[in-house]
């Protein structure tokens, strides 16, 4: 039997690590959250904002409210929209390329090791190195001139990382509306699903949530659009120059300048996705594939009907890992377009800029938003991963 | 030749063709980096930019070494010390968590793991002030401390999963012979740890070498690791591309060598990052 004394030693040996993490992770998160509720003494500060003498006042959720609505804080909203598009295209690109590569490598080919090495090596590089290299490729003499060199075609003039163009425009004020639409869409799929499976209880809940969402949107529409418009009819008679009702438009969209960064990021991480998929595919028993072939499945059919459904958990893991990486992105964007480039701004860069512009309270609020976003994908993930292992 | 065989050959050809195409696309950036690094500045003009250099030219490399040499030295100091310390710490934590019962383990372990996914922006500002307060801001020792602390989650996870494979009976046998906590570690667990150490050391080596976020926040010019001057140069308006590509090669080489020589272990560390043990 192991003695109590040894158990005590074991506990003591792990204590320093626990202590360090308690301070460096949880203590500092708490400090950041606390800072985000203050003004960091910006109004009455003495000297540098990092000076110990500063007096910061409690301002509640003002920082967060400003981030979401203040006209001067539009750059934060741009950074959120950029992160959104970046995440979608980066994760989608990695999953697609990673799956294709894994499927090809899984077909009992020769030189598998060599190909795997080639597809995975970008993972070993620093994001800074990747950024430096791709920035060179995006110079006018780089990729744009390749079709000309290879096939004698006209050179492209695509602006990979400097474009000022914005596509898919939308107004930030409509975001709640879009979120409602997306929510209702997902709920309707769920309801349909439950209907088929005859799970009435779950269906009822989904319908209730959909009803609440729809009601809230209706109230919002009434108070922000219908009501002011009827009021305005009266107002217009007296003040013809009155501004249009509702908040000022805050136009956002997909910044084309992100394209180059997304491609570089996919180049770096597609191999990692491939490795995850490949590990998953090797886990699918050969008998299962054989059985499908015997039943007359084509090679493609085997993938579509047998392998793909088995890969769902792997794909989900990959989505979560890649998604949380893109939410945190900083290095690559810093190296490729610098810290002052508004077109490719992300929250990680805003936090960095606090050290230039002394706006630490606002940066803390941005950091908390980042943390919350990462938590919404990571906590359920950790939960299921650890539960699975215990079973 | 039957129709079946022909279809089979066509399909094989298609598979290899696609793979080779992908491989070429993946290698284009490296090709460009390598050829540019050995060119003179005029040779990076449109007409010759995709060609091999007419002769190996080391001007870019010399400039890069002059510019990045000191920071590369910093990188090596940082990486070697931080990797060794965090591997030792991780091994101890993994040993305790896999072979000894700790009160509250079911809560503690997920709390440790969360540190792996933490967006470091969420702790940067307090970290910066803390390092200032304890006088470790701006130097390599401070950066080592930070990498060791935030490396605890992943190193602990890898070692814990690794030690879970060591049968408990081996430790029980040791206990019968009167071995205590330390003897079990030094005589049973540690001698079996070599592959675990290799995975963790490779992982931490590449992670710390490649880190930019902590480096740019916590160092001053004299203590910067190589990623900082490279990123600043790259994000700026520098047009001396042979020098920049040489710098990129210098920064890429150590982790790349590790990857090529010990790829198998590197991938194990990579997949460990997606948690499942």
Image (cartoon, coloured by chain):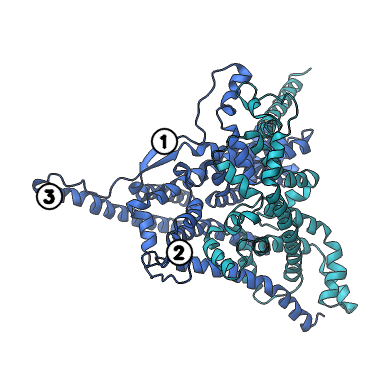
How many tags in the picture?
Answer: 3
Q: Which element carries disc 2, helix, strand or loop?
A: loop
Instruction: Tell me, by letter, which chain the rendering colours blue.
Output: A
* Residue at the bottom extreme of this rendering: A4
Chain ID at mark 1: A
Mark 2 or 3, nearer chain start: 2
Residue A235: assigned label: 3
Foreground: disc 1 or disc 2: 2
Q: CA distance from mark 3 to mark 1?
A: 36 Å
**Quadrant hosting residue B139:** bottom right
* Residue at the image position 57 percent from the left and 59 percent from the top: B118
* Residue at the left extreme of this rendering: A238
Please tell me if label 3 and label 1 are on a single chain. Answer: yes
Q: Is residue B143 above or below residue B256?
A: below
Whether residue A275 is visible to the viewer of this picture, yes or no, is: no
Task: Look at mark 1 in the image and give the residue it sits on.
Answer: A167
Q: Which element carries disc 1, helix, strand or loop?
A: strand
Tell me residue B274's x, y (percent).
65, 54
Chain ID at mark 3: A
Instruction: Tell me, by letter, which chain the rendering colours cyan.
Output: B
How dense is the environment of label 1, judged by Cα within 10 Å: few (below 14), some, or many (20 and up)? Answer: few
Residue B178: assigned label: none
Marks 2 and 3 in Cβ contact (< 8 Å):
no
Task: Look at mark 2 in the image and give the residue it sits on.
Answer: A49
Taking B206 as reference, is A326 left or right? left
How dense is the environment of label 3, judged by Cα within 10 Å: few (below 14), some, or many (20 and up)? Answer: some
Mark 3 or 1, nearer chain start: 1
Chain ID at mark 2: A
């Amino acid at each position: 039997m192991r003695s109590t004394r040894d158990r005590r030693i074991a506990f003591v040996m792990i204590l320093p690590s626990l202590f360090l993490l308690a301070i460096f992770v949880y203590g500092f998160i708490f400090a950041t959250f606390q800072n985000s509720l203050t003004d960091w003494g910006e109004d009455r500060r003495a000297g540098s904002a990092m000076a110990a003498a500063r007096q910061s006042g409690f301002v509640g959720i003002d920082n967060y409210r400003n981030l979401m609505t203040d006209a001067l804080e539009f750059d934060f909203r741009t950074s959120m929209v950029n992160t959104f598009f970046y995440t979608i295209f980066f994760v989608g690109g990695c999953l697609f390329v990673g799956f294709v590569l894994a499927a090809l490598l899984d077909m009992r080919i020769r030189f598998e090791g060599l190909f795997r090495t080639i597809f995975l090596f970008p993972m070993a590089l620093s994001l800074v190195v990747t950024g430096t290299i791709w920035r060179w490729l995006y110079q006018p003499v780089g990729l744009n001139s390749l079709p000309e060199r290879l096939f004698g075609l006209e050179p492209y003039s695509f602006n990979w990382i400097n474009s000022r163009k914005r596509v898919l425009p939308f107004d930030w004020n409509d975001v709640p509306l879009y979120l409602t639409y997306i929510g209702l869409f997902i709920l309707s799929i769920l309801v349909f699903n439950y209907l088929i499976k005859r799970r009435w209880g779950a269906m009822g809940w989904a319908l209730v949530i959909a009803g609440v969402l729809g009601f809230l949107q209706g109230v919002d529409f009434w108070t922000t659009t219908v009501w002011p418009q009827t009021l305005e009819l009266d107002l217009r008679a007296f003040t013809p120059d009155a501004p249009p009702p509702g908040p000022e438009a805050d136009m956002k969209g997909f910044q084309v300048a992100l394209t180059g960064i997304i491609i570089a990021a996919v180049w770096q991480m597609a191999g990692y996705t491939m490795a995850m998929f490949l590990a998953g595919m090797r886990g699918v028993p050969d008998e299962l594939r054989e059985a499908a072939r015997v039943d007359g499945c084509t090679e493609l059919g085997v993938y579509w009907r047998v392998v793909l459904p088995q890969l769902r958990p792997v794909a989900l893991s990959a989505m979560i890992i890649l998604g949380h990486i893109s939410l945190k992105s900083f290095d690559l964007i810093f190296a490729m377009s610098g810290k002052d480039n508004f077109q490719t701004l992300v929250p990680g860069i805003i936090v960095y800029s606090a050290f230039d512009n002394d706006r630490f309270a606002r940066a803390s609020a941005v950091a908390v938003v980042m943390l919350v976003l990462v938590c919404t994908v990571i906590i359920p993930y950790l939960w299921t991963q650890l539960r699975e292992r215990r079973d | 030749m039957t129709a079946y065989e022909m279809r089979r050959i066509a399909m094989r050809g298609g598979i290899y063709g696609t793979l080779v195409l992908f491989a070429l696309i993946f290698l284009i950036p490296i090709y460009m980096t390598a050829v540019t690094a050995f060119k003179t500045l005029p040779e990076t003009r449109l007409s010759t930019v995709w060609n091999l250099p007419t002769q190996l030219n080391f001007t870019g490399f010399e400039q890069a070494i002059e510019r990045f040499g000191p920071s590369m030295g910093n990188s090596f100091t940082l990486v070697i010390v931080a990797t060794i310390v965090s591997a030792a710490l991780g091994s101890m934590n993994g040993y305790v968590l896999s072979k000894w019962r700790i009160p509250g383990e079911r809560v503690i372990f997920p709390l440790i793991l969360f540190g792996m996914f933490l967006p470091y922006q969420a702790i940067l500002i307090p970290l910066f002030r803390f390092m200032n307060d304890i006088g470790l801001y701006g130097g390599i020792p401070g950066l080592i401390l930070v990498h060791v602390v935030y490396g605890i989650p992943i190193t602990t996870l890898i070692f814990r999963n690794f030690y879970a494979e060591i049968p408990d009976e081996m430790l029980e046998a040791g206990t019968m012979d009167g071995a205590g906590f330390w003897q079990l570690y030094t005589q049973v667990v540690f001698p079996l740890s070599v592959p675990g150490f290799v995975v963790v050391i490779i992982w931490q080596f590449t992670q710390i070498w490649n880190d930019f976020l902590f480096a740019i926040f916590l160092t001053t010019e004299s203590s910067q690791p190589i990623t900082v001057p490279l990123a600043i140069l790259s994000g700026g308006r520098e047009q001396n591309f042979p020098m920049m590509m040489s710098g990129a090669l210098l920064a890429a080489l150590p982790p790349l060598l590790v990857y090529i020589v010990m790829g198998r272990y590197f991938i194990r560390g990579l997949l460990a990052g997606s948690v499942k043990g």
